[in-house]
Amino acid sequence: MNKEQPSLKEFIKSTLLDINCAVIEAKKEGIPIAYRQYNNDILPILKTVEFDIAIQVSEDESSGKNKGAGFGISVVNLNISSDKEKTHLQNLTNRIKFSVDLFLGLEKEDNQI
């Protein structure tokens, strides 16, 4: 199955949108949201969403061709061999760690800070 990985940008954006939508839906179903005053605005309490992402680049050592970059949860090393030739795929992994502070539970019309 050759399913294309989403871009890092799309992954981060969809994750943040999904988290905020879940909080909004929970609020509409009666889950109370904590609020605090920030300057002159009453806003939900600021929350931090932390990301720890592994970026993988695969290279076919027999041809030297880059197989592209993607991200995922796990690291996989593949050794593919046949009687005719042996191919070794190497996955190089880098980690990106960062956090984003959000006022969770605000809808678009509320989000004019």
Image: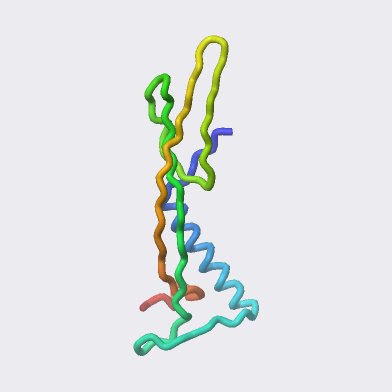
In percent of width and height, residue 41 lies at 39, 87
Q: Residue furthest top?
A: 84
Figure quadrant of residue 69? top left
Identify which residue, 48 or 24, lies in the foreground.
Answer: 48
In percent of width and height, residue 90 lies at 45, 31
Query: What residue sits 44% from the left and 77% below the top?
Result: 46
Q: Residue furthest right?
A: 29
Identify which residue, 39 or 94, lies in the foreground.
Answer: 94
Against 96, is 39 above or below?
Answer: below
Identify which residue, 90 or 16, lies in the foreground.
Answer: 90
Figure quadrant of residue 99? bottom left
Against 98, is 60 above or below?
Answer: above
Against 95, is 64 above or below?
Answer: above
Query: What residue sits 45% from the left and 35% below the top?
Result: 91
What's the image's color scheme? rainbow
In percent of width and height, residue 106 lies at 48, 75
Quarter holding the N terminus?
top right
